[in-house]
Amino acid sequence: MPILCKSNCGNKAVLKRPKTADALCKECFFAAFEAEIHHTITSSKLFRHGEKVAVAASGGKDSTVLAHVLKLLNERHNYGLELVLLSIDEGITGYRDDSLETVKKNRDDYEMSLKILSYEELYGWTMDRIVAQIGRSNNCTFCGVFRRQALDRGAKLLGVDSIATGHNADDIAETVIMNILRGDTARLSRCTDIKTGGSEDSIPRVKPLKYTYEKEIVMYAHYKKLVYFSTECVFAPNAYRGHARAFLKDLEKVRPSVIMDIIHSGEQLRFKDTVKKPTRGICERCGFVSSQQPCKACVLLEGLNRGLPKLGIGKKSKGDRMIANQEKEMALRDKANLVKNDF
């Protein structure tokens, strides 16, 4: 006997929502999915009428669904937004070059302008070259740091009022777990924020999909027949996030509500006044937002340019010793050359 849609529309149910376990037809699922994102946007006051918003587009399911839903809701509810796509080309052969073709298809489908910035033009390095230097360990550190700053650079070039990212509920729950395991109180205190940045010197980032399950994003993209790129990054299997993701999936089997539970726990988290938290400011070298001097991106880039790719990995004192040793070796080499030239 067929199961009817729980919304009493009279249609047969075709899916069971992972978030609520409700049996719904496609149209009622679409309506519920879009209504929840609209509620998230309006209740959190993510946008103001007339703003220009950059959608961080990678070509994957999250950014594709985000672009589609934002365009739909913008027209349906008269947000009055000017939406543009912003993509970062990390320079990963066989991955990013293919996914950017999907982004270009999204550009045409959603009639949005597209800006693509590459690591090569911003930093003089591609991820392929960086991995050749650093190896398969810690390469995600470089990519994550450079990508975050590249989005800021792109947003500044486009003159947007905010950046909308495709971070979903699963992503945020994983980040909470990672920051707890690393004891990173600075990131733990803000990783569940639906809106970050927004000071005079930085462009705010917003997460319209904060309370949206990854499984439902996949289902929405599937039933809407959206075009997205689904191949995993060739360097991702060694990422630390993968362990947090596997742990979260195991917890979800035991307690289906664990994703929202973790997010709500992160939202309620408070630290004692005695806990030292870094102050966000502006990097003296590049002029972009940072909680250290110089910023992490500048330190990592300096290491690559110096031939010390591990300079920004680990404690600052370790990096200072690496620079001191390199400068000492260079001084000894210069001295040896002077002695040689005297003869």
Image (tube, rainbow, N blue to C red):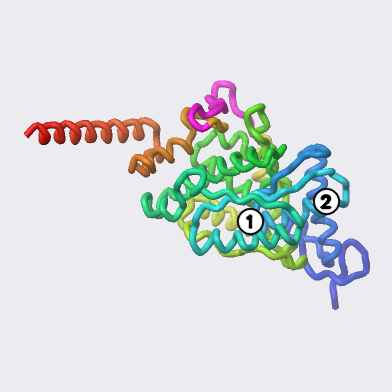
Badges 2 and 1: C-beta atoms under 8 Å apart? Answer: no
Q: Secondary structure at mark 2?
A: helix
Q: Position of residue 88 (x, y in %)?
A: 58, 50
Q: Within 10 angstroms of label 1, few (less than 14), some, or many (20 or more) residues? A: few
| Residue 238 highlighted magenta (yes or no) | no
Q: Main structural element of the magenta stretch: helix, strand or loop?
A: loop
Q: Quadrant of the C terminus?
A: top left
Q: CA distance from mark 2 to mark 1?
A: 30 Å
Q: Name the residue located 59 percent from the left edge and 53 percent from the top edge.
A: 248
| Residue located at (67% from left, 54% from top) | 63
Instruction: State which quarter of the image contains the N terminus.
Output: bottom right
The disc, 2 or 1, on the residue closer to the chain's N-terminal end is 2
Amino acid found under the numbered disc labelled 2: Leu
Highlighted magenta segment, given as a residue range: 269-286
Q: Amino acid at mark 1?
A: Glu
Up the image or down, 204 lies above or below 67; here it is above
For label 1, the residue is 252
Residue found at x 62% / y 50%: 171
Q: Report the front residue among 159 and 249.
A: 159
Front-most of residues 86 and 176: 86
| Residue denoted by label 2 | 73
